[in-house]
Image (cartoon, rainbow, N blue to C red):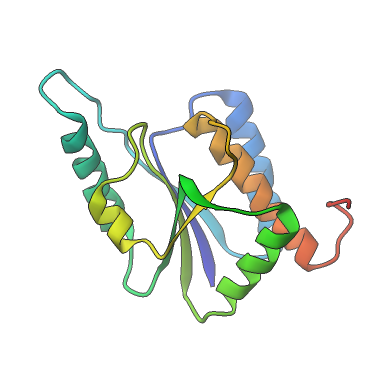
């Protein structure tokens, strides 16, 4: 089983890259985890928002494999506390999937085709965060979930 974190656009800020790298390193103790970056498509004057989402959507769909369990990080998704998320993640890992793919789209969201391919949607918060910060928050939450599942002292209740 592998967890793939598929994101649109690269992370620019060093402090975010350092934080993400730290949690990716920690996660290696528990599960194969990798972040894949789809280059951001620049919006020029002739490209409508829907066209941009379609192009990004095609790139996202091209990275998915048959049998992937696909979770969109989406403001309209289901929200969990950390312990409940850990239990939810464990259920998904027990589902026999080769890969669970968590996806962060571009600034305009996902195309209808990506929504149709997704198995579920997950919301990190009712608040809005930059796409780059979400990467750090989410990577930390995956790490936290594994420490909860292993009853390790990282998470305090």
Placement of 10 over or under 140, stated as above or below: above
Which of 21 and 108 lies nearest the eye of the viewer? 108
The residue at the point 51 percent across, 32 percent down is 132
Q: In this view, which residue lies farthest toward the top?
A: 45
Q: Position of residue 39 (x, y in %)?
A: 32, 37
The quadrant of the rendering that contains the N terminus is bottom right
Left or right of 82, for residue 93: left
Q: Position of residue 37 (x, y in %)?
A: 40, 43
Point 47% across, 74% down: residue: 98
Query: Taking 120 as reference, is 48 left or right?
Result: left
Direction from residue 51 to residue 137 in the image, left or right: right
Residue at 58% of width from left, 44% of height from top? 124
Q: Position of residue 82 (x, y in %)?
A: 72, 54
Residue 9, how many percent across, how many down?
38, 34
Q: Observer-nearest residue: 79 or 42?
A: 79
Q: How many discs appear?
A: 0
Q: Quadrant of residue 105?
A: top left
Q: Residue at x 10, y 22 (%)?
A: 46
């Amino acid at each position: 089983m592998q967890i793939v974190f598929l994101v649109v656009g690269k992370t620019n800020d060093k402090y975010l890259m350092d934080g993400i790298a730290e949690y990716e390193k920690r996660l290696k103790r528990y599960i194969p985890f990798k972040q894949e970056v789809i280059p951001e498509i620049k919006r020029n004057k002739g490209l409508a928002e829907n066209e941009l989402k379609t192009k990004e959507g095609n790139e996202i769909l091209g990275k998915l494999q048959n049998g992937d369990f696909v979770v969109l990080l989406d403001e309209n998704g289901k929200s969990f506390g950390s312990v409940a998320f850990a239990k939810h993640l464990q259920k998904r890992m027990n589902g026999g999937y080769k890969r669970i793919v968590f996806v962060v789209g571009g600034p305009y969201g996902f195309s209808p085709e990506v929504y149709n391919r997704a198995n579920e949607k997950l919301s990190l918060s009712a608040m809005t965060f930059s796409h780059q910060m979400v990467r750090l928050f989410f990577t930390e939450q995956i790490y936290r979930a594994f420490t909860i599942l292993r009853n390790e002292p990282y998470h305090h209740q």
